[in-house]
Image (cartoon, rainbow, N blue to C red):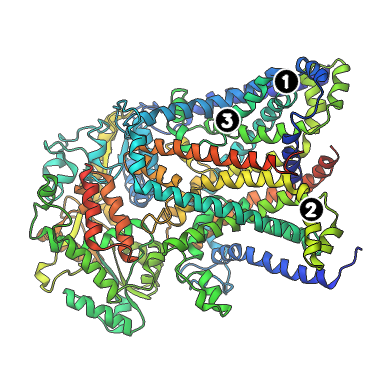
């Protein structure tokens, strides 16, 4: 599995090495040697299935199409004006940000700790690498069903807490709005921490185990030494991991839809669930598409800010 | 040379295979649908939600047997997915010949949404139209009296009781509101909950208001829906407040199991089947749901939910249930009509509703009411039912708002006046 | 330095405990799926008399067999095309340092940002016009386009870090562009190909809404669609539902376990490259 992460790590380090390599003289020669038409098949499929239909879809945001009728008329930016006044939409934006930030920070933290744990001499490391990654292969919708069952009032989570003598921690995990948001973040971490772990593991391959071992032992000095050695090695893996979790968190849909459907009330509506509701359930397709465009802008701004920010950091770029 | 030849050939062959397979497989679209183009008069495409699967399959088997050479291809999907695919198919002209359509309004694939957009065939000339009971007409016809969908079943909302469990604890189903509150207290004393409430599943939250409002609102004022449409009445200024208050009163009286907002619809069926809860306020389709999970020999009954202290004032929510329309672009319109005629015949209807644990929308003498639904059949006969409220709401937002505010009420995040005001606001969006 | 100290023992214990915690949900999943119908629902207590009857029921009633064949076909063909086309495209994107190639690269990356709702209906209409609805090839075309951005991102970034010497040697040799790509560049990409394959297989295999829409009305279904039609029909019969879930997860877990060795090999060469 580590191969996947290794390659990903290399991919990220390649990304930053991009423009730095190749002196000018070589460049010219290469331009003629590399056939540009190699991009054509990829571009054809991409334009056909993604770029062009997305543009067509985006154009619908300027209409009043309800998603069904055979008529639609041009309304300019009216749908976007509605958005500003829509308290459900602003609520969903905050929920989306909460989930995205929660996932980005915690999933990577847990993933890193797990990676440090299995990048050691422990005998179970190979089994653990498989076991911890297993949740990542489950269909997101199935994950939603499974956790809805586990988080029910008399479900396995409350049972387990009771059995461990932690009965005072038993909660209505999905019945309380604030708690349900946290529960969603926890479920995503369960599913994808192993995924982050694998990518970090690849980055850790360049770090001698002795340094990790030593840092387990002593105080802050050792930790600082450890960090100064490990951090540059991990930077490319971190770039990939952050990019994946920011985009994944902002666009999260399946698990939320199955677990809470955006409820109770609107407490766990994300931008994606609200887009879906408007487009397909409220007879308000164009408005849903307007929201989808706002979501696109969010993802674009946050992921590129994050990406550029990391590239500027020492260790993040060379 | 050999190598480079292979490297050119492999992607080329792949592309060719792709094109070849594409043309070969595109004829696989089953049955009709404008895009499928199976206008052979022998193949019919039908689509419905998975709730209808067993009943529809049973009717299709009979229909195919009676019409040799005819094939009916039915596609079923879960409710959310059905709404999404059907809307996309309708607007793209790829919908099946016969499709499940919700009666009334208030749903993304309801007849008042789909028919005005011009996607359904006018069924006004069908023979069965004359037999439609008055109570059902408003939700399958438009204001000019044209009929757009064929209602097969009559559904009702009531309390689905596990009678075996009731007997164990020595309780009987309540017939007045005071008895109901007492029933809740008695059940609690026995360590059970009177009613399971799966308020995590959003559509469940509407059922208690829907069960109470026929008695509280519509029995006294059958024209309430029209008055609302005319802007002369509102949720906030009506007995809807009483209905919502009573819903909360039930919560305070401990009628429900702990944490309704964390409990799903599925979990409530299990709770009633196992006797942890004595009943659940649900649609008649929950009857087979409970029976399917309960130990062999468990008796289940759908009974009215009292809303006042006079049993004679109790009405039930009862309405057109499973209904189907014909796609205006159907590939096989004649076969589609033939199929709907069969489904609407006493024979077809009885097979359908018996499988689905419902009543026929057009009563007939051959129908044997199953014991669990006798109360609903009696109320239907006496005219003491009123359609599900959402069938008469002007848009899908009102119902979605009800889902949200009902959950917020149970969670204590809003109060009845604001909740109903929010519904009025959604209603006004038209 | 290679000794197993008591600290390693503590770490081992902690990690095993964490691993078990991660596996609890999967344990519950399998446990319930082995429960006899109408048995008591105790998620954590091992089932008294495990039965495979749910698996047989789920398999037969949900039509999971043919659905699995469809899913496998779609996944294998899509991922194959994705790998070939993305790798091909990455070569000029990584090696040509002119402005158009970096703009093109960013144009591909924009695809990562777009929510699926935007393209859903326009693409459906196009597929209808091409007569591709109801065919698994509509899905293949969609996935190949959809997965291009991320795959190209991984390939291009990887290739930029690989020294140019190899290809130069091959091009001096006088080989044609496709040949030198196939015999020189593509093997270099092997380690990152492992990543591309895994991530794409997960995406394609698990997708739900697109196959639902494109195959609706046809006799063909993919595994997630068949599974959730089944789930919505047997709502509260968790034993049946969970047996179906286990069946749907099993093939992908199996592939993952089987690929483990190849991937680790590829990883070693990836470090050298």
The numbered dot on residue A228 is: 2
Q: Using the image, name the chain to which the residue with label 3 belongs.
A: C
Alpha carbons under labels 3 and 1: distance apart:
22 Å
Q: Is residue B323 above or below residue B25?
A: below
- Closest to the observer: A86 or B10? A86
The residue labelled by disc 1 is B9
Q: Chain of mark 2?
A: A
**Residue A132 appears at what percent x and percent y?**
68, 58
Q: Quadrant of residue B345?
A: top left
| Residue A120 higher or lower than B72, as above or below | below
How many numbered marks does the figure carry? 3
Q: Percent from the top left, x then y, of residue B368?
A: 21, 60
| Nearer to me, A317 or B207 | A317
Image quadrant occupied by the N terminus of chain B = top right
Comparing labels 3 and 1, the label whose residue is closer to the camera: 3
User: Which residue bears the numbered disc 3?
Assistant: C145
Tell me, yes or no, if residue A215 can be seen here.
yes
Viewer-side label of 2, 3: 2
Residue drawn at point x = 25 percent, y = 33 percent: B120
Residue B121 lies left or right of residue A139; in this view the side is left
Residue at the (66%, 67%) spot, across then down: C20
Secondary element under disc 2, as helix, strand or loop, is helix
Chain letter of the residue carrying label 1: B
**Would you say residue A67 is visible in this rendering?**
no
Q: C179 or A291, which lies in front? A: A291
């Amino acid at each position: 599995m580590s191969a996947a992460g290794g390659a990903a790590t290399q991919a990220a380090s390649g990304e930053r090495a991009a423009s730095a390599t190749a002196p000018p003289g070589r460049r010219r020669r290469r331009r003629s040697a590399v056939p540009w038409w190699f991009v054509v098949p990829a571009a054809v499929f991409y334009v056909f299935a993604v770029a062009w239909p997305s543009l067509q879809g985006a154009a619908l945001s300027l209409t009043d199409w309800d998603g069904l009728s055979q008529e639609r008329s041009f309304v300019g930016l009216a749908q976007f004006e509605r958005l500003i006044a829509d308290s459900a939409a602003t609520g969903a934006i905050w929920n989306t940000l909460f989930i995205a930030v929660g996932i980005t920070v915690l999933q990577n933290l847990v993933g890193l700790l797990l990676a440090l744990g299995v990048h050691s001499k422990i005998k179970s490391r190979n089994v653990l690498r498989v076991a911890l990654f297993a949740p990542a292969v489950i269909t997101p919708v199935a994950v939603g069903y499974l956790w809805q069952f586990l988080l029910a009032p008399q479900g396995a989570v409350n049972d387990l807490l009771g059995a461990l003598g932690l009965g005072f921690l038993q909660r209505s995990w999905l019945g309380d709005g604030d708690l349900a948001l946290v529960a969603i973040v926890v479920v995503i971490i369960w599913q994808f921490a192993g995924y982050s772990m694998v990518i970090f593991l690849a980055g850790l391959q360049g770090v001698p185990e002795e340094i990790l071992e030593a840092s387990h032992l002593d105080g802050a000095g050792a930790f600082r030494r450890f960090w100064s050695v490990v951090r540059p090695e991990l930077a490319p893996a971190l770039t990939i991991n952050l990019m994946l979790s920011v985009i994944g968190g902002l666009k999260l849909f399946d698990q939320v839809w199955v677990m809470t459907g955006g409820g109770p009330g609107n407490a766990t509506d994300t931008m994606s669930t609200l887009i879906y509701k408007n487009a397909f359930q409220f007879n308000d397709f164009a408005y849903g598409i307007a929201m989808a465009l706002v979501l696109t802008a969010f993802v674009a701004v946050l992921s590129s800010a994050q990406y550029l920010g990391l590239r500027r950091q020492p260790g993040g770029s060379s | 040379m050999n190598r480079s030849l292979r490297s050119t050939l492999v992607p080329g062959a792949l592309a060719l295979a792709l094109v070849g397979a594409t043309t070969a497989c595109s004829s696989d679209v089953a049955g009709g649908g404008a895009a499928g183009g199976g206008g052979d008069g022998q193949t019919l495409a039908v689509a419905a939600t998975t709730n209808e699967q067993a009943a529809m399959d049973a009717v299709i088997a009979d229909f195919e047997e009676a019409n040799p050479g005819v094939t009916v291809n039915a596609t079923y999907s879960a409710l959310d997915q059905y709404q999404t695919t059907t809307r996309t198919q309708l607007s793209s002209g790829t919908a099946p010949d016969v499709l499940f359509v919700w009666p009334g309004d208030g749903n993304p694939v309801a007849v008042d949404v789909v028919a005005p957009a011009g996607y359904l065939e006018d069924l006004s000339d069908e023979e069965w139209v004359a037999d439609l009971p008055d109570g059902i007409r408003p939700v399958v016809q438009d204001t000019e009296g044209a009929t757009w969908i064929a209602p097969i079943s009559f559904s009702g909302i009531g309390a689905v009781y596990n009678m075996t469990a009731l007997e164990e604890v020595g309780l009987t189903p309540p017939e007045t509101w005071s008895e109901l509150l007492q029933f809740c207290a008695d059940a609690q004393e026995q360590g059970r909950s009177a009613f399971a409430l799966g308020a995590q599943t959003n559509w469940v939250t509407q059922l208690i208001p829907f069960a109470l409002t026929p008695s509280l609102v519509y029995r006294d004022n059958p024209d309430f829906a029209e008055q609302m449409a005319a802007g002369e009445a509102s949720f906030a200024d009506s007995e809807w407040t009483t209905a919502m208050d009573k819903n909360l009163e039930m919560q305070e009286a401990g009628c429900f199991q702990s944490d309704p907002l964390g409990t799903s619809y599925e979990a409530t069926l299990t709770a009633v089947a196992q006797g942890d809860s004595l009943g659940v306020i649900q649609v008649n389709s929950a009857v087979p749901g409970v029976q399917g999970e309960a130990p062999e020999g468990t008796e289940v009954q759908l009974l009215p939910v009292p809303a006042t202290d006079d049993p004679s004032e109790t009405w039930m929510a009862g309405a057109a249930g499973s209904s189907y329309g014909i796609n205006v672009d159907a590939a096989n319109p004649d076969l589609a009509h033939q199929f709907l005629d069969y489904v609407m015949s006493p024979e077809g209807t009885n097979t359908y509703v018996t499988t689905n644990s419902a009543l026929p929308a057009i009563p007939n003498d051959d129908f044997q009411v199953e014991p669990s639904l006798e109360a609903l059949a009696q109320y239907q006969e006496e005219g003491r039912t009123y359609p599900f409220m959402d069938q008469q709401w002007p848009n899908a937002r009102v119902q979605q708002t009800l889902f949200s505010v009902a959950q917020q009420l149970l969670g204590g995040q809003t109060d009845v006046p604001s909740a109903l005001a929010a519904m009025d606001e959604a209603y006004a969006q038209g | 330095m290679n000794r197993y100290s008591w600290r390693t023992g503590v770490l081992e214990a902690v990690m095993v405990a964490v691993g078990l915690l991660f596996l609890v949900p999967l344990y519950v999943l399998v446990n319930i799926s082995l429960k006899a119908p109408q048995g008591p629902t105790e998620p954590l207590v091992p089932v008294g008399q495990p039965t495979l009857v749910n698996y047989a029921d789920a398999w037969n009633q949900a039509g999971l067999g043919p659905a699995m064949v469809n899913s496998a076909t779609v996944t294998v063909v899509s991922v194959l095309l994705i790998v070939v086309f993305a790798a091909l495209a990455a070569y000029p994107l990584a090696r040509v340092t002119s402005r158009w190639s970096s703009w093109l690269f960013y144009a591909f990356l924009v695809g990562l940002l777009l929510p699926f709702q935007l393209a859903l209906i326009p693409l459906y209409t196009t597929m209808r016009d091409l007569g591709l609805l109801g065919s698994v090839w509509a899905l293949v075309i969609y996935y190949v386009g959809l997965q291009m951005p991320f795959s190209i991102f991984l390939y291009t970034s990887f290739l930029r870090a690989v020294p140019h010497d190899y290809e130069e040697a091959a091009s001096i040799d006088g080989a044609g562009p496709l040949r030198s790509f196939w015999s020189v560049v593509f093997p270099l990409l092997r380690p990152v190909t492992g990543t591309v394959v895994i991530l794409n297989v997960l995406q394609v295999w698990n997708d739900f809404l697109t196959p639902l829409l494109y195959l609706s009305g046809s006799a063909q279904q993919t595994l997630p669609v068949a599974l959730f039609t089944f789930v919505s029909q047997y709502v509260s019969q968790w034993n049946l539902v969970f047996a179906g879930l286990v069946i749907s997860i099993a093939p992908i877990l199996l592939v993952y376990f089987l690929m483990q060795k190849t991937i680790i090999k590829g990883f070693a060469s990836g470090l050298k490259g």
